Image: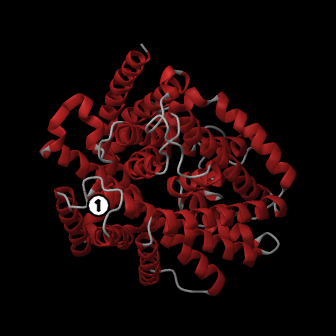
Amino acid sequence: MKKVSNVFYVTTALVILFVLIGAIIPVRFEQITTNINAFLSTTFGWYYMWLMVALVVLSLFIIISPYGKIRLGKNNDRPDFSTPTWIAMLFSAGLGIGLVFYGAAEPLFHGFLDSPLSEEGSDQAFKEGLSLTFFHWGIHGWAMYGIVALSLAFFQFRKGEPGLISATLKPLFGDKMKGPWGITIDVLATFATIFGVATSLGLGAMQINAGLNHLFGIEVNFAVQFIIVAIVTVLFLASSWSGLSKGIKYLSNANMALAVLLFIAVLFIGPTLLILNMFTDTFGLYIQNFVHWSFRSAPLEGDNRSWVDGWTIFYWAWWISWAPFVGMFIARVSRGRTIREFMIGVIVAPTFIIAVWFATFGTTAGNIQRNGFDLTQFSTELVTFNMFDQMPFSSILSVLAILLLMTFFITSADSATFVLGMQTTNGSLTPPNSVKTVMGLAQSAVALILLYVGGLTALQNTIIAAALPFSFVVILMMIALVKALKEEMKTIGQRKK
Protein backbone atom coordinates (compact mmCIF):
# COMPACT_ATOMS: atom_id res chain seq x y z
CA MET A 1 0.00 0.00 0.00
CA LYS A 2 2.91 2.32 0.53
CA LYS A 3 3.78 2.39 -3.16
CA VAL A 4 3.93 5.95 -4.46
CA SER A 5 1.10 6.56 -6.94
CA ASN A 6 0.91 8.67 -10.09
CA VAL A 7 -0.98 11.27 -8.03
CA PHE A 8 2.33 12.03 -6.27
CA TYR A 9 4.24 12.69 -9.50
CA VAL A 10 1.49 14.72 -11.23
CA THR A 11 0.83 16.90 -8.17
CA THR A 12 4.55 17.46 -7.50
CA ALA A 13 5.06 18.52 -11.14
CA LEU A 14 2.13 20.96 -10.97
CA VAL A 15 3.41 22.49 -7.71
CA ILE A 16 6.93 22.90 -9.12
CA LEU A 17 5.46 24.60 -12.23
CA PHE A 18 3.36 26.93 -10.05
CA VAL A 19 6.33 27.86 -7.83
CA LEU A 20 8.58 28.54 -10.84
CA ILE A 21 6.01 30.79 -12.54
CA GLY A 22 5.48 32.71 -9.29
CA ALA A 23 9.23 33.14 -8.77
CA ILE A 24 10.00 34.20 -12.36
CA ILE A 25 7.10 36.61 -13.02
CA PRO A 26 5.73 37.62 -9.58
CA VAL A 27 3.97 40.84 -10.65
CA ARG A 28 2.28 39.25 -13.66
CA PHE A 29 1.40 36.23 -11.54
CA GLU A 30 -0.42 38.38 -8.98
CA GLN A 31 -2.33 40.15 -11.79
CA ILE A 32 -3.42 36.81 -13.24
CA THR A 33 -4.62 35.45 -9.86
CA THR A 34 -6.48 38.72 -9.16
CA ASN A 35 -8.30 38.52 -12.52
CA ILE A 36 -9.18 34.85 -11.99
CA ASN A 37 -10.44 35.63 -8.50
CA ALA A 38 -12.65 38.49 -9.72
CA PHE A 39 -14.12 36.33 -12.50
CA LEU A 40 -14.80 33.30 -10.30
CA SER A 41 -16.24 35.30 -7.38
CA THR A 42 -18.61 37.22 -9.66
CA THR A 43 -19.61 34.29 -11.88
CA PHE A 44 -19.74 31.39 -9.42
CA GLY A 45 -20.64 33.13 -6.14
CA TRP A 46 -24.26 31.94 -6.32
CA TYR A 47 -23.02 28.39 -7.02
CA TYR A 48 -20.77 28.32 -3.94
CA MET A 49 -23.75 29.46 -1.85
CA TRP A 50 -26.10 26.76 -3.14
CA LEU A 51 -23.43 24.11 -2.64
CA MET A 52 -22.87 25.08 1.01
CA VAL A 53 -26.63 25.14 1.67
CA ALA A 54 -26.98 21.68 0.09
CA LEU A 55 -24.27 20.36 2.42
CA VAL A 56 -26.08 21.76 5.49
CA VAL A 57 -29.39 20.20 4.39
CA LEU A 58 -27.75 16.82 3.67
CA SER A 59 -25.96 16.87 7.05
CA LEU A 60 -29.23 17.52 8.90
CA PHE A 61 -30.99 14.78 6.93
CA ILE A 62 -28.26 12.22 7.74
CA ILE A 63 -28.31 13.12 11.47
CA ILE A 64 -32.06 12.57 11.85
CA SER A 65 -32.36 9.64 9.41
CA PRO A 66 -31.92 5.91 10.21
CA TYR A 67 -28.50 6.19 8.51
CA GLY A 68 -27.26 7.78 11.74
CA LYS A 69 -27.17 4.37 13.45
CA ILE A 70 -24.57 2.95 11.03
CA ARG A 71 -21.12 2.60 12.56
CA LEU A 72 -18.01 3.85 10.76
CA GLY A 73 -16.29 0.48 10.82
CA LYS A 74 -17.34 -3.01 11.73
CA ASN A 75 -20.25 -3.33 14.16
CA ASN A 76 -17.94 -4.16 17.07
CA ASP A 77 -15.43 -1.36 16.34
CA ARG A 78 -15.12 1.40 18.94
CA PRO A 79 -13.38 4.82 18.76
CA ASP A 80 -9.56 4.90 18.80
CA PHE A 81 -9.47 8.23 20.68
CA SER A 82 -11.39 9.62 23.66
CA THR A 83 -14.03 12.24 22.83
CA PRO A 84 -12.04 15.19 24.31
CA THR A 85 -8.90 14.19 22.35
CA TRP A 86 -11.04 13.65 19.23
CA ILE A 87 -12.60 17.13 19.53
CA ALA A 88 -9.13 18.62 20.14
CA MET A 89 -7.94 16.98 16.91
CA LEU A 90 -10.96 18.30 14.97
CA PHE A 91 -10.36 21.76 16.41
CA SER A 92 -6.62 21.81 15.63
CA ALA A 93 -6.79 20.35 12.13
CA GLY A 94 -10.04 21.98 11.01
CA LEU A 95 -9.48 25.53 12.17
CA GLY A 96 -5.83 26.28 12.48
CA ILE A 97 -4.22 29.65 12.14
CA GLY A 98 -7.29 31.48 10.81
CA LEU A 99 -8.88 31.46 14.25
CA VAL A 100 -6.04 33.57 15.70
CA PHE A 101 -5.51 35.60 12.51
CA TYR A 102 -9.17 36.69 12.26
CA GLY A 103 -10.22 36.29 15.93
CA ALA A 104 -10.34 40.01 16.77
CA ALA A 105 -10.02 41.50 13.29
CA GLU A 106 -12.99 40.05 11.44
CA PRO A 107 -15.78 41.03 13.88
CA LEU A 108 -14.10 44.43 14.23
CA PHE A 109 -13.95 45.06 10.46
CA HIS A 110 -17.57 43.93 9.90
CA GLY A 111 -18.80 46.14 12.72
CA PHE A 112 -16.66 49.27 12.44
CA LEU A 113 -14.91 49.48 9.06
CA ASP A 114 -16.99 47.86 6.31
CA SER A 115 -20.39 46.85 7.64
CA PRO A 116 -22.52 45.20 4.92
CA LEU A 117 -25.89 45.68 6.64
CA SER A 118 -25.89 48.63 9.06
CA GLU A 119 -24.05 51.91 9.63
CA GLU A 120 -20.42 51.32 10.68
CA GLY A 121 -19.86 51.74 14.40
CA SER A 122 -23.53 51.53 15.34
CA ASP A 123 -24.73 49.16 18.07
CA GLN A 124 -26.46 47.04 15.45
CA ALA A 125 -23.33 46.83 13.26
CA PHE A 126 -21.25 45.81 16.29
CA LYS A 127 -23.61 42.89 16.94
CA GLU A 128 -23.92 41.97 13.27
CA GLY A 129 -20.13 41.91 12.97
CA LEU A 130 -20.00 39.07 15.49
CA SER A 131 -22.96 37.20 14.00
CA LEU A 132 -21.53 37.38 10.47
CA THR A 133 -18.25 35.98 11.77
CA PHE A 134 -20.12 33.04 13.38
CA PHE A 135 -21.80 32.57 10.00
CA HIS A 136 -18.50 32.40 8.11
CA TRP A 137 -16.86 30.01 10.58
CA GLY A 138 -19.81 27.96 11.75
CA ILE A 139 -22.28 25.36 10.53
CA HIS A 140 -21.77 25.71 6.75
CA GLY A 141 -18.03 25.06 6.83
CA TRP A 142 -18.30 22.17 9.25
CA ALA A 143 -21.07 20.61 7.16
CA MET A 144 -18.61 20.67 4.26
CA TYR A 145 -15.96 18.97 6.41
CA GLY A 146 -18.51 16.56 7.84
CA ILE A 147 -19.87 15.25 4.53
CA VAL A 148 -16.42 14.85 2.94
CA ALA A 149 -15.07 13.17 6.10
CA LEU A 150 -18.15 10.93 6.42
CA SER A 151 -17.80 9.75 2.82
CA LEU A 152 -14.15 8.88 3.36
CA ALA A 153 -14.69 7.20 6.74
CA PHE A 154 -17.69 5.19 5.52
CA PHE A 155 -15.98 3.79 2.44
CA GLN A 156 -12.65 3.26 4.18
CA PHE A 157 -13.73 1.66 7.45
CA ARG A 158 -17.15 0.20 6.60
CA LYS A 159 -16.52 -0.93 3.02
CA GLY A 160 -12.76 -1.56 3.12
CA GLU A 161 -11.86 0.88 0.34
CA PRO A 162 -8.56 2.83 0.30
CA GLY A 163 -8.63 6.25 1.98
CA LEU A 164 -8.85 8.19 -1.28
CA ILE A 165 -11.35 10.76 -2.56
CA SER A 166 -11.67 8.73 -5.78
CA ALA A 167 -12.74 5.64 -3.80
CA THR A 168 -15.83 7.49 -2.52
CA LEU A 169 -17.13 7.82 -6.10
CA LYS A 170 -17.19 4.08 -6.86
CA PRO A 171 -20.98 3.83 -6.35
CA LEU A 172 -21.31 6.15 -9.37
CA PHE A 173 -18.42 5.14 -11.62
CA GLY A 174 -17.30 1.70 -10.45
CA ASP A 175 -13.84 0.51 -11.50
CA LYS A 176 -13.28 3.61 -13.67
CA MET A 177 -12.03 5.23 -10.45
CA LYS A 178 -9.01 2.89 -10.54
CA GLY A 179 -7.73 4.44 -13.79
CA PRO A 180 -7.00 7.91 -15.19
CA TRP A 181 -10.31 9.34 -13.94
CA GLY A 182 -9.52 8.32 -10.39
CA ILE A 183 -6.04 9.82 -10.66
CA THR A 184 -7.57 13.09 -11.92
CA ILE A 185 -9.97 13.23 -8.95
CA ASP A 186 -7.17 12.56 -6.44
CA VAL A 187 -4.87 15.13 -8.09
CA LEU A 188 -7.63 17.77 -7.78
CA ALA A 189 -8.05 16.88 -4.10
CA THR A 190 -4.31 16.91 -3.41
CA PHE A 191 -3.80 20.17 -5.30
CA ALA A 192 -6.68 21.86 -3.44
CA THR A 193 -5.23 20.63 -0.14
CA ILE A 194 -1.75 22.01 -0.83
CA PHE A 195 -3.13 25.44 -1.71
CA GLY A 196 -5.69 25.52 1.09
CA VAL A 197 -3.08 24.71 3.73
CA ALA A 198 -0.47 26.96 2.10
CA THR A 199 -2.90 29.88 2.51
CA SER A 200 -3.09 29.21 6.25
CA LEU A 201 0.68 28.82 6.53
CA GLY A 202 1.09 32.15 4.75
CA LEU A 203 -1.37 33.83 7.14
CA GLY A 204 0.48 32.29 10.09
CA ALA A 205 3.87 33.49 8.90
CA MET A 206 2.50 37.01 8.38
CA GLN A 207 1.00 37.17 11.87
CA ILE A 208 3.99 35.61 13.65
CA ASN A 209 6.15 38.19 11.87
CA ALA A 210 3.75 40.96 12.94
CA GLY A 211 3.82 39.72 16.55
CA LEU A 212 7.61 39.59 16.64
CA ASN A 213 7.71 43.08 15.18
CA HIS A 214 5.25 44.30 17.79
CA LEU A 215 7.14 42.75 20.71
CA PHE A 216 10.77 42.97 19.63
CA GLY A 217 10.90 45.37 16.68
CA ILE A 218 11.86 42.64 14.17
CA GLU A 219 11.22 43.95 10.65
CA VAL A 220 8.12 42.87 8.72
CA ASN A 221 9.35 41.59 5.38
CA PHE A 222 9.54 38.50 3.20
CA ALA A 223 13.01 37.51 4.47
CA VAL A 224 11.75 37.20 8.06
CA GLN A 225 8.66 35.33 6.89
CA PHE A 226 10.90 32.96 4.91
CA ILE A 227 12.89 32.16 8.08
CA ILE A 228 9.66 31.62 10.06
CA VAL A 229 8.29 29.21 7.43
CA ALA A 230 11.65 27.39 7.26
CA ILE A 231 11.83 26.89 11.06
CA VAL A 232 8.23 25.74 11.33
CA THR A 233 8.68 23.40 8.34
CA VAL A 234 11.49 21.60 10.16
CA LEU A 235 9.31 21.34 13.28
CA PHE A 236 6.19 20.01 11.56
CA LEU A 237 8.17 17.52 9.48
CA ALA A 238 9.82 16.21 12.67
CA SER A 239 6.36 15.87 14.22
CA SER A 240 5.02 14.19 11.07
CA TRP A 241 7.77 11.57 11.13
CA SER A 242 6.82 10.62 14.70
CA GLY A 243 3.42 9.33 13.52
CA LEU A 244 -0.27 10.08 14.14
CA SER A 245 -0.59 8.62 17.63
CA LYS A 246 2.41 10.55 18.97
CA GLY A 247 3.13 13.84 17.22
CA ILE A 248 -0.31 14.99 16.09
CA LYS A 249 -2.10 13.65 19.17
CA TYR A 250 0.22 15.39 21.67
CA LEU A 251 0.43 18.58 19.62
CA SER A 252 -3.36 18.76 19.26
CA ASN A 253 -3.81 18.47 23.02
CA ALA A 254 -1.05 21.07 23.65
CA ASN A 255 -2.67 23.30 21.04
CA MET A 256 -6.06 23.01 22.72
CA ALA A 257 -4.52 23.77 26.13
CA LEU A 258 -2.80 26.92 24.78
CA ALA A 259 -5.99 28.05 23.04
CA VAL A 260 -8.02 27.55 26.23
CA LEU A 261 -5.40 29.45 28.25
CA LEU A 262 -5.42 32.43 25.88
CA PHE A 263 -9.21 32.36 25.63
CA ILE A 264 -9.69 32.35 29.44
CA ALA A 265 -7.13 35.14 29.84
CA VAL A 266 -8.92 37.40 27.32
CA LEU A 267 -12.35 36.48 28.72
CA PHE A 268 -11.47 37.53 32.27
CA ILE A 269 -9.08 40.41 31.52
CA GLY A 270 -11.47 41.80 28.91
CA PRO A 271 -15.05 43.07 29.50
CA THR A 272 -16.36 39.73 30.84
CA LEU A 273 -20.01 40.60 31.38
CA LEU A 274 -20.26 42.36 28.01
CA ILE A 275 -18.67 39.32 26.30
CA LEU A 276 -21.21 36.93 27.86
CA ASN A 277 -24.15 39.16 26.95
CA MET A 278 -22.85 39.80 23.41
CA PHE A 279 -22.31 36.07 22.84
CA THR A 280 -25.87 35.30 23.96
CA ASP A 281 -27.42 38.07 21.85
CA THR A 282 -25.34 37.59 18.69
CA PHE A 283 -25.61 33.79 18.64
CA GLY A 284 -29.37 34.30 18.57
CA LEU A 285 -28.93 36.82 15.73
CA TYR A 286 -26.87 34.22 13.83
CA ILE A 287 -29.65 31.61 14.19
CA GLN A 288 -32.33 34.15 13.30
CA ASN A 289 -30.58 35.23 10.05
CA PHE A 290 -29.16 31.83 9.14
CA VAL A 291 -31.38 31.20 6.11
CA HIS A 292 -31.24 34.74 4.70
CA TRP A 293 -27.46 35.04 4.96
CA SER A 294 -27.03 31.57 3.46
CA PHE A 295 -28.56 32.88 0.24
CA ARG A 296 -27.38 36.51 0.39
CA SER A 297 -25.81 37.02 -3.05
CA ALA A 298 -26.19 40.86 -3.17
CA PRO A 299 -27.45 41.00 -6.79
CA LEU A 300 -28.17 44.75 -7.06
CA GLU A 301 -25.77 47.72 -7.23
CA GLY A 302 -26.55 49.01 -3.74
CA ASP A 303 -26.14 45.58 -2.12
CA ASN A 304 -22.37 45.79 -1.54
CA ARG A 305 -21.49 42.75 -3.68
CA SER A 306 -17.76 43.36 -3.16
CA TRP A 307 -18.22 42.57 0.55
CA VAL A 308 -19.87 39.24 -0.27
CA ASP A 309 -17.06 38.37 -2.72
CA GLY A 310 -14.30 39.43 -0.33
CA TRP A 311 -15.68 37.64 2.71
CA THR A 312 -18.45 35.07 2.25
CA ILE A 313 -17.36 33.68 -1.14
CA PHE A 314 -13.71 33.70 -0.04
CA TYR A 315 -14.62 31.72 3.07
CA TRP A 316 -16.78 29.20 1.20
CA ALA A 317 -13.89 28.62 -1.23
CA TRP A 318 -11.43 28.29 1.66
CA TRP A 319 -13.62 25.66 3.37
CA ILE A 320 -13.92 23.75 0.08
CA SER A 321 -10.16 23.80 -0.53
CA TRP A 322 -9.50 22.55 3.02
CA ALA A 323 -12.19 19.84 2.79
CA PRO A 324 -10.09 17.01 1.28
CA PHE A 325 -7.34 17.52 3.86
CA VAL A 326 -9.52 18.02 6.93
CA GLY A 327 -12.04 15.44 5.70
CA MET A 328 -9.34 12.78 5.40
CA PHE A 329 -7.83 13.66 8.74
CA ILE A 330 -11.21 13.64 10.53
CA ALA A 331 -12.07 10.33 8.85
CA ARG A 332 -8.76 8.83 9.93
CA VAL A 333 -9.32 9.64 13.62
CA SER A 334 -13.05 8.76 13.70
CA ARG A 335 -13.18 5.00 13.14
CA GLY A 336 -15.67 3.26 15.43
CA ARG A 337 -18.13 6.15 15.91
CA THR A 338 -21.73 6.02 14.68
CA ILE A 339 -22.65 8.33 11.81
CA ARG A 340 -25.01 10.34 14.05
CA GLU A 341 -22.39 10.76 16.79
CA PHE A 342 -19.82 11.65 14.15
CA MET A 343 -21.91 14.31 12.36
CA ILE A 344 -23.14 15.97 15.56
CA GLY A 345 -19.58 16.01 16.94
CA VAL A 346 -18.10 17.43 13.75
CA ILE A 347 -20.71 20.18 13.26
CA VAL A 348 -22.08 21.20 16.66
CA ALA A 349 -19.02 21.16 18.96
CA PRO A 350 -16.69 23.21 16.70
CA THR A 351 -19.45 25.71 15.82
CA PHE A 352 -20.09 26.40 19.51
CA ILE A 353 -16.34 26.66 20.32
CA ILE A 354 -15.86 29.06 17.41
CA ALA A 355 -18.77 31.29 18.48
CA VAL A 356 -17.44 31.54 22.03
CA TRP A 357 -13.92 32.32 20.73
CA PHE A 358 -15.00 35.06 18.31
CA ALA A 359 -17.45 36.55 20.82
CA THR A 360 -14.60 36.88 23.33
CA PHE A 361 -12.00 38.38 20.98
CA GLY A 362 -14.45 40.33 18.81
CA THR A 363 -16.31 41.90 21.74
CA THR A 364 -13.03 42.87 23.42
CA ALA A 365 -11.78 44.51 20.21
CA GLY A 366 -15.12 46.24 19.61
CA ASN A 367 -15.23 47.54 23.17
CA ILE A 368 -11.72 49.03 22.83
CA GLN A 369 -12.78 50.60 19.52
CA ARG A 370 -15.88 52.16 21.09
CA ASN A 371 -13.80 53.54 23.97
CA GLY A 372 -11.80 55.69 21.57
CA PHE A 373 -8.77 53.66 20.42
CA ASP A 374 -8.99 53.03 16.66
CA LEU A 375 -8.03 49.39 15.98
CA THR A 376 -9.32 49.54 12.39
CA GLN A 377 -6.22 51.55 11.38
CA PHE A 378 -4.11 48.37 11.65
CA SER A 379 -3.74 45.57 9.11
CA THR A 380 -5.47 42.26 9.87
CA GLU A 381 -2.38 40.55 11.28
CA LEU A 382 -1.69 43.45 13.70
CA VAL A 383 -5.19 43.97 15.17
CA THR A 384 -4.89 41.29 17.87
CA PHE A 385 -1.52 42.51 19.14
CA ASN A 386 -2.68 46.15 19.27
CA MET A 387 -5.81 45.03 21.07
CA PHE A 388 -3.60 43.33 23.70
CA ASP A 389 -1.69 46.62 24.09
CA GLN A 390 -4.84 48.18 25.51
CA MET A 391 -5.20 45.41 28.12
CA PRO A 392 -3.28 44.40 31.28
CA PHE A 393 -0.52 41.77 30.82
CA SER A 394 -0.27 42.71 27.14
CA SER A 395 3.20 41.19 26.58
CA ILE A 396 2.17 37.86 28.12
CA LEU A 397 -0.97 37.75 25.95
CA SER A 398 1.09 38.52 22.82
CA VAL A 399 3.63 35.78 23.62
CA LEU A 400 0.76 33.32 24.21
CA ALA A 401 -0.78 34.28 20.85
CA ILE A 402 2.54 33.76 19.02
CA LEU A 403 3.01 30.36 20.70
CA LEU A 404 -0.55 29.38 19.73
CA LEU A 405 0.11 30.45 16.14
CA MET A 406 3.22 28.27 16.13
CA THR A 407 1.37 25.21 17.43
CA PHE A 408 -1.54 25.78 15.03
CA PHE A 409 1.00 26.18 12.21
CA ILE A 410 2.67 22.88 13.14
CA THR A 411 -0.54 20.87 13.73
CA SER A 412 -2.21 22.08 10.51
CA ALA A 413 0.87 21.40 8.39
CA ASP A 414 1.60 18.14 10.21
CA SER A 415 -1.97 16.86 9.68
CA ALA A 416 -1.97 17.99 6.05
CA THR A 417 1.39 16.32 5.41
CA PHE A 418 0.01 13.04 6.74
CA VAL A 419 -3.11 13.35 4.57
CA LEU A 420 -1.14 14.30 1.45
CA GLY A 421 1.05 11.27 2.11
CA MET A 422 -2.10 9.09 2.17
CA GLN A 423 -3.44 10.67 -1.02
CA THR A 424 -0.23 10.03 -2.94
CA THR A 425 0.42 6.44 -1.76
CA ASN A 426 -2.89 4.81 -2.72
CA GLY A 427 -4.47 5.61 0.64
CA SER A 428 -1.82 4.12 2.91
CA LEU A 429 -2.56 4.73 6.61
CA THR A 430 1.21 4.87 7.26
CA PRO A 431 2.70 6.86 4.36
CA PRO A 432 6.51 6.78 4.17
CA ASN A 433 8.48 9.70 5.62
CA SER A 434 10.09 10.45 2.25
CA VAL A 435 6.67 11.16 0.68
CA LYS A 436 5.53 13.21 3.69
CA THR A 437 8.73 15.26 3.43
CA VAL A 438 8.15 16.11 -0.25
CA MET A 439 4.50 17.02 0.39
CA GLY A 440 5.45 19.11 3.44
CA LEU A 441 8.06 21.01 1.45
CA ALA A 442 5.50 21.54 -1.34
CA GLN A 443 3.08 23.24 1.08
CA SER A 444 5.81 25.49 2.44
CA ALA A 445 7.10 26.37 -1.03
CA VAL A 446 3.62 27.40 -2.21
CA ALA A 447 3.09 29.46 0.96
CA LEU A 448 6.40 31.29 0.39
CA ILE A 449 5.65 31.99 -3.27
CA LEU A 450 2.23 33.41 -2.38
CA LEU A 451 3.81 35.62 0.29
CA TYR A 452 6.48 36.69 -2.19
CA VAL A 453 4.11 37.68 -5.00
CA GLY A 454 1.48 39.55 -3.00
CA GLY A 455 0.93 38.54 0.59
CA LEU A 456 -2.67 38.32 1.77
CA THR A 457 -4.18 39.26 -1.61
CA ALA A 458 -2.35 36.48 -3.45
CA LEU A 459 -3.28 33.99 -0.72
CA GLN A 460 -6.97 34.85 -1.00
CA ASN A 461 -6.95 34.89 -4.81
CA THR A 462 -5.42 31.43 -5.05
CA ILE A 463 -7.94 29.86 -2.66
CA ILE A 464 -10.91 30.83 -4.85
CA ALA A 465 -9.29 29.27 -7.95
CA ALA A 466 -8.11 26.09 -6.22
CA ALA A 467 -11.55 25.41 -4.72
CA LEU A 468 -13.68 25.50 -7.88
CA PRO A 469 -12.57 22.22 -9.53
CA PHE A 470 -12.82 20.29 -6.27
CA SER A 471 -16.32 21.67 -5.58
CA PHE A 472 -17.65 19.56 -8.49
CA VAL A 473 -16.06 16.49 -6.90
CA VAL A 474 -17.89 17.31 -3.63
CA ILE A 475 -21.25 17.24 -5.45
CA LEU A 476 -20.45 13.78 -6.84
CA MET A 477 -19.38 12.64 -3.34
CA MET A 478 -22.75 13.74 -1.91
CA ILE A 479 -24.68 11.75 -4.52
CA ALA A 480 -22.43 8.68 -4.12
CA LEU A 481 -22.70 8.79 -0.32
CA VAL A 482 -26.51 8.85 -0.30
CA LYS A 483 -26.58 5.97 -2.81
CA ALA A 484 -24.13 3.92 -0.72
CA LEU A 485 -26.00 4.59 2.55
CA LYS A 486 -29.27 3.41 0.96
CA GLU A 487 -27.56 0.19 -0.15
CA GLU A 488 -26.04 -0.29 3.30
CA MET A 489 -29.46 0.03 5.00
CA LYS A 490 -30.88 -2.60 2.60
CA THR A 491 -27.98 -4.92 3.46
CA ILE A 492 -28.53 -4.41 7.21
CA GLY A 493 -32.27 -5.09 6.77
CA GLN A 494 -31.59 -8.33 4.88
CA ARG A 495 -29.18 -9.52 7.60
CA LYS A 496 -31.83 -8.98 10.27
CA LYS A 497 -34.26 -11.16 8.29
Amino acid bearing label 1 = Gln
Q: Is residue 429 above or below residue 283?
A: below
Horizontal and vertical percent position of residue 58: 46, 27
- Name the foreground residue: 223 vs 479: 479
- Asked whether the viewer can see residue 26, the reply is yes
Q: What residue is drawn where x is 25% and y is 57%?
A: 1
Quadrant for the C terminus, please: top left
Tell me which colouring the rendered structure shows.
Answer: secondary structure
Q: Secondary structure at mark 1?
A: helix
- Residue visible at 26% across and 64% down? 29
Residue that appears at 76% across and 74% down? 394
Quarter location, residue 2: bottom left
Extreme residue in the top direction = 497
In the image, 220 versus 267, the foreground residue is 267
Q: Residue 445 location in percent, x, y?
A: 32, 72
Crowding at dot 1, Cα within 10 Å, few <14 / some 14-19 / many 20+, comes out as some
Q: Residue furthest left?
A: 180
Horizontal side of 216 relative to 48 (left or right) equals right
Give the image quarter of residue 431. Answer: bottom left
Query: Is residue 210 positioned above or below 32 on the image?
Result: below
Q: Which residue is mark 1?
A: 31
Of residues 243 and 378, the one nearer the viewer is 243
- Picture coordinates of residue 390 (x, y %)? 78, 70
Q: Residue furthest right?
A: 273
Instruction: Count the labels in the image.
Output: 1
Question: 487 or 412: which is nearer to us?
Answer: 487
Q: Determine if residue 456 is in view.
A: no
Residue 51 location (% of width, % of height): 40, 32
Q: Quadrant of residue 472?
A: top left
Q: Is residue 281 left or right of residue 290?
A: right
Q: In the shown orientation, is residue 385 left or right of residue 43?
A: right
